Image (cartoon, rainbow, N blue to C red):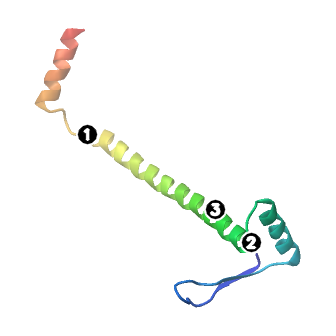
Amino acid sequence: MKNMAVSTTINGKTRLEARLSAEEKAYFERAAALGGFRSLTEFVLRSAKQHAEEIVKQHEMVIASKKDSEVFFNAILNAEPPNDKLVAAAKKFKKAK
């Protein structure tokens, strides 16, 4: 798609306009028909939404993964010394072996 523009909102909906070549339009229309979509618009919107969801999910996973890594390594590198109960449990465990 070569050029996109969004016009003003009317009744809570906006309009998305895209300029594309005749070949691109024909190709998308063929894909829409083969995919069982009711219209080219439905095909484009569903495809765009699916791709957007994948991108957002992947981004959120990266952010969560970075945060989890920071929490994990911070807990290891800046660990509190063991409290009395943990020391006693470790001694009990060693005796039981």
Up the image or down, 10 lies above or below 39; here it is: below
Up the image or down, 80 lies above or below 89; here it is: below
Left or right side of 4 for 91: left
Up the image or down, 21 lies above or below 82; here it is: below
Discs 3, 1 touching: Cβ within 8 Å: no
Report crowding for label 1: few under 14, some 14 to 19, many 20 or more residues within 10 A (C-alpha).
Answer: few
Which residue in the protein does label 3 denote?
51
Q: Earlier in the sequence, mark 2 or mark 1?
A: 2
Which residue in the protein does label 2 denote?
39
Residue shown at the point (46%, 56%) measured from the top left: 63
* Residue 94 point in image, percent of width and height: 22, 13
* Residue 60 point in image, percent of width and height: 49, 57
Q: Earlier in the sequence, mark 3 or mark 1?
A: 3
Image quadrant holding the N terminus, namely bottom right
Circle 3 sits in a helix, a strand or a loop, which is it?
helix
Circle 2 sits in a helix, a strand or a loop, which is it?
loop
Circle 1 sits in a helix, a strand or a loop, which is it?
loop
Q: Nearer the viewer, mark 2 or mark 1?
A: 2
Q: Nearer the viewer, mark 3 or mark 2?
A: 2
